[in-house]
Image (cartoon, grey):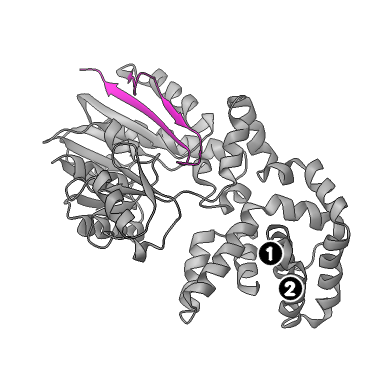
């Protein structure tokens, strides 16, 4: 509980959950798999349900405790709700945890958590009356979804609060989804085929325990993300650019499907190393370039690309269940900042696209400012751009479901 509270505190102070998690693991190499799993479960769960814990504590505390201890209370309250059979144990553990560094707060923590138990009916009412507690998302987020998707927003929010599915992409150069499912069944792993290249596990597994991962037979990639390579439609011999490519899953998928000349462009050197690692594991070859997609004069050799995959930075609102800190770190004004960056990137990339070539615009966002409105504005700026249908539609907005995360796709062709 103490270690989970460290992560929650870091996120509420504006930090990135995954970065702080990696740092915490590095500082505690002696942790067993069980300890790692418990800390991750507590911290991810607390952030996923932050709105529910906050709704309770702001009524039971006259003023918030110092940040680390407030975070500990959030962890404890979430655990009490999700494990009601353990409430008394949780209370005792929280009191012990705070006593290790702030003995004077033991009584406060004990009183608050016991009030959660004694006033259970009131606690339930507070959560039902508070929109952020009820939906486990920020109010502005829910309002945007409700306006854009009046018939689907509730299902999308519910999916965004669930544990994410674990999907694998099968390397078509080494196996098929049907063969992988059969091999998994023989190993006691329940799974089913999804899409053209995917295998969805009934229950997530540690990557080290996934048969064929180390050998490059499969990769971890959400089923929604697996559409990118197929809808890009690269053919043998094409020059292909994957911009903002890290960690390289979509680029590797393109290379698994066709013999193309691929450049993977990534701004962050650390993340770029993961692209090389994935290419090596999968046995595919591509050129990795570290540079800014907005500055083609620095990295482009002047030879046009037939296909460009523009997987641009975004709010990541479609993958918030994997990264629950996103829900509470993002603010509504951030969308305009992301939209401006996206426009810069795709305007720059368009210069490098061959006449008659296609650019697939991709985000893992569910917000129109980054998706539908972005592409509409792009087409107004570029009269040589035309929309192509993707499976009969001018765009594809995937909202989160039990099978996949949220993604947006639009396919643009540069007129000859």
Location of the C terminus (image quadrant):
top left
Q: Is residue 43 left or right of residue 70?
A: left
Q: Eyeballing the image, is 270 above or below 393?
A: below
- Residue 155: percent from the left, percent from the top? 59, 34
The verdict on residue 199 being magenta is: no
- The structure residue drawn at horizontal position 36% and vertical position 55%, both measured from the top left corner, is 268
Foreground: disc 1 or disc 2: 2
- The numbered mark at residue 89 is 2
- The structure residue drawn at horizontal position 83% and vertical position 61%, both measured from the top left corner, is 116
- Do we see residue 31 in this rendering? yes
The one nearer the camera, 345 or 260, is 260
Q: Eyeballing the image, is 217 above or below 197?
A: below
- Residue 313: percent from the left, percent from the top? 43, 43
What residue occupies the far left of the structure in this picture?
Answer: 237
Q: Secondary structure at mark 2?
A: helix
Which residue in the protein does label 1 denote?
Answer: 75
């Amino acid at each position: 509980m103490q270690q989970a509270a460290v992560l929650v505190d870091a996120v509420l102070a504006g930090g990135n959950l995954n970065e702080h998690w990696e740092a915490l693991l590095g500082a505690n190499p002696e942790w067993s798999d069980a300890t790692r799993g418990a800390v991750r479960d507590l911290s991810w769960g607390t952030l996923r349900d932050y709105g529910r814990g906050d709704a309770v504590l702001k009524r039971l505390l006259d003023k918030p405790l110092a940040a680390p201890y407030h975070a500990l209370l959030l962890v404890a309250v979430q655990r009490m709700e999700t494990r009601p059979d353990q409430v008394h144990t949780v209370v005792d553990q929280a009191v012990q945890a705070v006593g290790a560094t702030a003995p004077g707060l033991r009584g406060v923590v004990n009183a608050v958590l016991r009030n959660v138990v004694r006033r259970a009916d009131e606690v339930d009412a507070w959560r039902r009356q508070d929109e952020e507690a009820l939906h486990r998302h920020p109010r502005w987020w829910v309002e945007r979804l409700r306006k854009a998707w009046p018939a689907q927003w509730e299902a999308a929010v519910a999916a965004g609060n669930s544990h994410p599915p674990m999907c694998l992409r099968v390397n078509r150069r080494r196996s098929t989804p049907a063969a992988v499912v059969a091999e998994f069944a023989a190993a006691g792993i329940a799974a089913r085929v999804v899409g053209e290249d995917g295998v969805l596990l009934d229950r997530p597994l540690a990557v080290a325990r996934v048969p064929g991962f180390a050998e490059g037979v499969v990769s971890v990639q959400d089923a929604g993300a697996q559409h990118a390579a197929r809808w890009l439609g690269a053919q043998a011999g094409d020059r292909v650019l994957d911009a903002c490519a890290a960690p390289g899953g979509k680029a590797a998928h393109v290379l698994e499907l066709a013999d193309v000349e691929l450049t993977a462009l990534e701004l962050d050197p650390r993340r770029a190393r993961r692209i090389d690692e994935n290419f090596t594991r999968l046995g595919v070859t591509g050129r990795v370039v570290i540079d800014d997609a907005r500055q083609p004069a620095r990295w482009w050799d002047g030879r046009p690309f037939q296909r460009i995959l523009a997987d641009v930075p975004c709010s990541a609102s479609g993958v918030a269940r994997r990264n629950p800190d996103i829900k509470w770190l993002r603010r509504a004004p951030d969308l305009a900042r992301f939209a401006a960056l996206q426009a810069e990137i795709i305007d720059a990339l368009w210069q490098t696209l061959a006449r008659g070539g296609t650019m697939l615009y991709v985000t893992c966002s569910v917000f129109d400012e980054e998706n539908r409105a972005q592409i509409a504005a792009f087409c107004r700026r570029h009269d040589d751009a035309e929309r192509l249908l993707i499976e009969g539609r001018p765009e594809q907005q995937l909202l989160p479901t039990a099978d996949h995360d949220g993604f947006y796709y639009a396919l643009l062709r540069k007129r000859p």
